[in-house]
Amino acid sequence: MAIGEAGSSPSGLLPWRALGLLTNDDIRARIERLEIPFDHRGVDPYGVSKKDLLWFFSALGALYRHYFTVTVTGIENVPTRGRAMLVCNHSGGIALDGAMVLVSLLLEMEPPRLGHGMAEKFLNQVPFLSGWTRRTGQLTGLPENAARLLNDDRVLMVFPEGARGTAKLYWERHTLVRFGTGFVRLAMQTQSPIVPLAFLGGGEAVPTVANLYRLGKLFGAPYIPVTPYLVPIPRPVPLDILYGEPLVFTGTGQEADDVISAHVETVRDRISQLLADGQQRRQKNGA
């Protein structure tokens, strides 16, 4: 079923046809071109819904095209088909980086691709968000979900810095904290290429000066970021996404820790270089 045909939303909240004017025709067309096995209802085996994707990417696409100034380089390094793991640094106190990367895959790639992120587990505690994230392709961050996506030749987005990465303060925005190692083992187990990428500008968009950890726990979140203007509302700033050349590590994923750690450092060093390249370009452009 094409998006916008008669029917109601999967959540039963709003008739899609009645609100069709709020969506974007270009994004609608790109979602129709996704090489994903949607059934007659427009739902794939993971529960991803074309209709929810339309609202998700119409909203994010408006920010991507009209609110921020987004520059993407190297997206030709992302495979047009087949499995791939995108490994990115965290930038900014909220998941702005992941959202913009997902939009770049849909709007900048030919053919367009749907990226899947691993949603923070605390989102499952919010009734509406838990279902909505799944319907837009963002599954709970469990190893079995990640492995299944890659084995099904999907694009998986990974942030090995975890919540420590989004907790970076403004003056730490261009640094990298310790990477977890599980992503390399998973890439080797599933024989997936790793595409390193750097995201710049998130720290300027949400300039975090402090994190309220106790308050965050009350809401089931790791923390609540605080900006100079208190609330973490993103500012309209230039954003840069730099995709690097794919890295392939052969093996089973069961290698000794020192072997895996060396591969992790290789990825980390590549992202660090991409960050440096991005910073140099932004300085040249006065960003």
Image: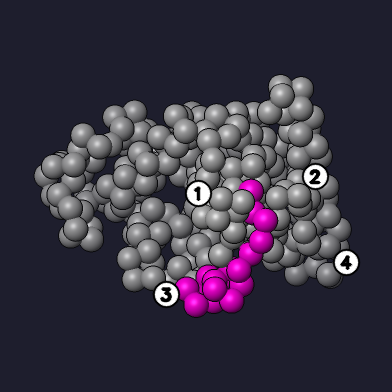
For the residues marked 4 and 2, what is the alpha-carbon distance in whole angstroms?
Answer: 21 Å
Looking at the rendered image, the quarter that the C terminus falls into is top right
Q: Which residue is mark 2?
A: 272
SS assignment at label 3: helix
Magenta span has 214? Answer: yes
Q: Amino acid at mark 1?
A: Ile
Q: For the magenta stretch, what is the residue range?
A: 207-223
Residue 54 versus residue 148 in the image, above or below: above
For the residues marked 3 and 1, what is the alpha-carbon distance in whole angstroms?
Answer: 23 Å
Q: Amino acid at mark 3?
A: Gln
For the residues marked 1 and 4, what is the alpha-carbon distance in whole angstroms?
Answer: 41 Å
Q: Which residue is mark 3?
A: 125
Q: Which residue is mark 4?
A: 258
Q: Residue at x 48, y 39 (%)?
A: 103
Q: Is residue 76 left or right of residue 102?
A: right
SS assignment at label 2: helix
Task: Give residue 226's position: percent from left, percent from top.
Answer: 59, 58
Which mark is in front, 3 or 4?
3
Q: Quadrant of residue 79?
A: top right
Q: Which residue is mark 1?
A: 233
Task: Give residue 2's position: percent from left, percent from top.
Answer: 22, 39
Task: Give residue 147's position: percent from left, percent from top.
Answer: 56, 63
